[in-house]
Amino acid sequence: MDFSGMTVEDLEARKLAIASEVEKEGADLDALENEVRAIKAELESRRETAQKQAEIRTQVAEGSGEVVENIIPKEEERKMYKTDSIEYRDAWTKKIIGRELNEEERAALASAGAVIPTMTVNAVWDKLTGDAELLGKVDVSQFPTYVRFPKATTKGAATAQAVGGTITESSDVVGYIDLIPNEYVKLLTVGADIDHMAVSAVHDWIVNNLVESIRAEINKDIVVGTGTNELKGILTSVSADSTAIPATVTKASLLKIMGALGSNYQSGAVWVMTPAMFYENVMTITQLNDYIINDGFSFRLFGHDVILMSELLVSTKETILYGDPKAYKLNIFKPLEVKPFETATTTNIQFRGATLADGELIDSAAFVRFAQA
């Protein structure tokens, strides 16, 4: 494959795009796999070229070795250590894990203030707000400070009248939800075997483990958070319906749950229930054979996504939520940052990942809640 006209940033962007393409139906997986391998080989080749150039420049500066013409323009050299480059990401990773930096890497980090690489921030954001789980379906924003969302606590109906007539409809009463930062933190401990891993592998391992832990906690709090030093969960905002789900779940009881949700929230609605409720109760209803779509471990019931969460076992009762997650406002005040964490209690390497977030359901009518008898 010819990559001569592509920059390092272009190659990285294409590699990320392939990750999305493989999920599409009918994707040519063999071709995409070959392209990824070719891109990795090209990036490695360019990295080796850049390293050789750095060594030559060092020799020239020290007065030893033969002066060799630089094959990459100076502008391209500088681009290699921009905060959105692989080289900068690797330099930043080496710094936080305590590996030795060369002169160019130290200069690049000092010039940028050692900020978190753009590639790391993007990778964290994609993993934190991906399509899976409830977190990937709520309305996520990124305001850096305290944020207030308006909500209509009373909605007046519109009226029809003669043109120019006296306005008689009632006005809305507007309230607010206020989101204030709560810190979500994960301390990750790794052993000495990290020294034997490639820098890029260390970076991905750290990011994946920190994001996975923090994502799981935020996802849980979207449902059961108390609102005190954490998100305010949907269960905290929505009261259980007076009609319980029967001990033996039926097609009729599920349709009754759907019918309890207002029409304005039906199109974006999802089901949220425990794995036990779904697999042991819902999936065993023979009448639903034509209404459950199974795509690997992703399910749709009556055309709506099913999200499985163990937290829906509330006070020993199986509970089902049905509603529109876009009515839940989640604000990430600060992207997840990664820093070394030093302590005298262990000789292992530790990293601290932290982000600031808050969230709340903007309209309690966006979900209905039923508990099993």
Image: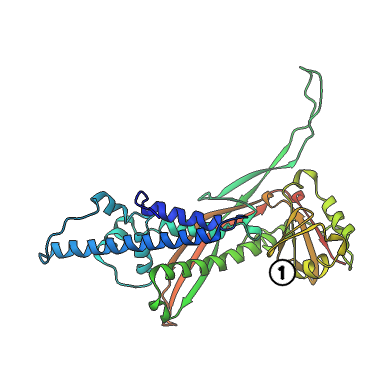
Q: Residue at x 24, y 64 (%)?
A: 52
Q: Is residue 3 above or below residue 319?
A: above
Left or right: where 69 falls relative to 345: left
Judge whether residue 334 can be spotted in this image. no
Please give left or right for residue 74 compared with residue 316 in the image. Answer: left
**Residue closest to the eye, 43 or 285:** 43
Horizontal and vertical percent for residue 208? 51, 67
For the image, the number of numbered tags is 1
Q: Percent position (x, y) of residue 269? A: 74, 51
Mark 1 surroundings within 10 Å by alpha-carbon count, few (fewer than 14), some (14 through 19), many (20 or more): some
User: Which image quadrant is residue 369 in?
Assistant: bottom right
- The colour mode here is rainbow
User: What residue is at 84 percent from the left and 55 percent from the top?
Assistant: 257
Residue found at the very far left of the displayed protein: 63
Q: Quadrant of the C terminus?
A: bottom right
For the residue pair 55 and 372, the one nearer the viewer reads as 55
Report helix, strand or loop for mark 1.
Answer: helix
Q: Position of residue 338 (x, y in %)?
A: 45, 65
Nearest the camera: 63 or 269? 63
Q: Amino acid at mark 1?
A: Ser
Is residue 26 visible to us here? yes
Q: Which residue is mark 1?
A: 310
87 left or right of 285? left
Residue in the foreground of this view, choosing between 270 and 299:
299
Q: Position of residue 219 (x, y in %)?
A: 63, 62
96 sits left or right of 248 in the view: left
> In the displayed image of the protein, which residue is found farthest to the top?
164
- For the N terminus, the image quarter is bottom left
